[in-house]
Image (spheres, helix red, strand yellow):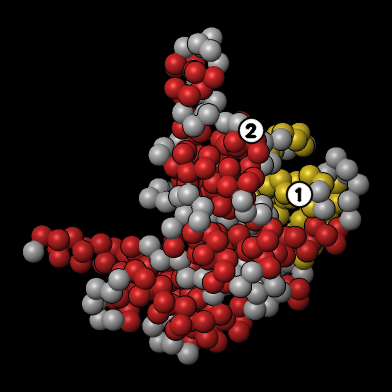
Amino acid sequence: MKKDFKILSNNFKGPMNLYLTIDSGQTSQPAWLEKVGYFQELIMVEGKPCLVKIRSQDLKGPLEVVAESPEEFEIEPVKNQIKGIFGLNDDLDKFYEFLISDPRLEPTIEFCSGLRLFKAHNPFECLIASISSANNSIIRWNRSIRLIKEKWGDCYQFSSGKFYTFPRPEKILEVPEHEVEELELCGGEKNLEECVNNLKSCGVGYRGKYINQAARMLTEDIDLYDIVKMSYEEAFQTMLKIPGVGPKVADCILLYGFGMEEAFPVDIWIKRIICELYFNGKNISVPKIRFFGMEQFGEYAGYVQLYLFHYARKSGLLDKLRLKNKIKSKT
């Protein structure tokens, strides 16, 4: 079954830059693939597999959607899920008023207009993507997550090709961490170089053990769907119990996976950006930067973090900070 519909601009407040949102490296999921003018991804809607194809002609135009499923489905639940994934319930007009009130934040609007939170349609995928992103490039962790889906997810054939779900924690538990473990499990029936059905073969490196341990914890101790019922602080402390999850990754999971927009993920670059803009370049610790961001930006902390990083990349601020750090390291 295939259905076409539009999400009109009066359904959301402020601009919507679809390309920028999908391509911004947020760790909710890999960037949706672009095929024949549409961004496409398989999502589950009310337990049914649904291929969503989406495009937009401009920042204020409607979102054009084609939804396809092997099962009967209604448009409204698909539309609601799309609105959730692309942050269409977030009031960007109000957020921009907040940015304009701070002269250090106002310049971000020019570079980030229409950029929205790209939220998870599968919290477990977001968790594993966030773990995989640690000390890793966007291209690499995107590739790793896609490979995990192709190797162990459920495959569905649509008119535009094959698409895969992200495997459940129980399935990940069955996957060997590396080729040596896979060789042992197969009883020596394969050569080592033939062992390519393991986490390491997906390019996750040392993170493979964390992915496996996280899957075990989520099958035995933690129900991800309980996180939405928790306060931010309780959810944050719960995330920290998961192997491979430190403060920055925990905040990414809560922001992109559960829409807790008070989260303020801090890596070395956000630390340097905040130090430069708010502390005259003084070296402030990551925990203090995180606390500052949450206090200073409040309900917009997650969005501010997203905008500051993109602004720094595109405006030249990041290059300036790299050079500044390089000079400092030589003195």
Find residue 213 and report its horizontal and vertical position in percent.
52, 42
Looking at the image, the residue that sits furthest to the front is: 221
Find residue 91 and report its horizontal and vertical position in percent.
65, 78
**Looking at the picture, which amino acid does disc 2 mark?**
Trp
Looking at the image, the residue that sits furthest to the bottom is: 101
Q: In the rendered view of the protein, which quadrant contains the N terminus?
A: top right
Residue position for label 2:
152
On screen, residue 34 above or below 10? above
Q: Secondary structure at mark 1?
A: strand
Q: State the image quarter where residue 225 is shown.
A: bottom right
200 and 272: which is toward the camera: 200
| Residue 264 falls left or right of residue 235 | left
Give the residue at x 56% y 35%: 147
| Residue 283 falls left or right of residue 167 | left
Residue position for label 1:
44
Find residue 148 and report its horizontal and vertical position in percent.
57, 36
Looking at the image, the residue that sits furthest to the top is: 189
**Looking at the picture, which amino acid does disc 1 mark?**
Met
From the image, state whether disc 1 or disc 2 is nearer to you.
2
On screen, residue 118 above or below 154? below
Determine if residue 231 is in view.
yes
Q: Are marks 1 and 2 in contact (CB under 8 Å)?
A: no
| Residue 262 falls left or right of residue 157 | left
Give the residue at x 46% y 39%: 209
Looking at the image, the residue that sits furthest to the right is: 72
Task: Give the mark nearest the N terminus, 1 or 2.
Answer: 1
Real-space Cα distance between discs 1 and 2? Answer: 16 Å
60 and 192: which is toward the camera: 192
Q: Secondary structure at mark 2?
A: helix
Determine if residue 112 is in view.
no
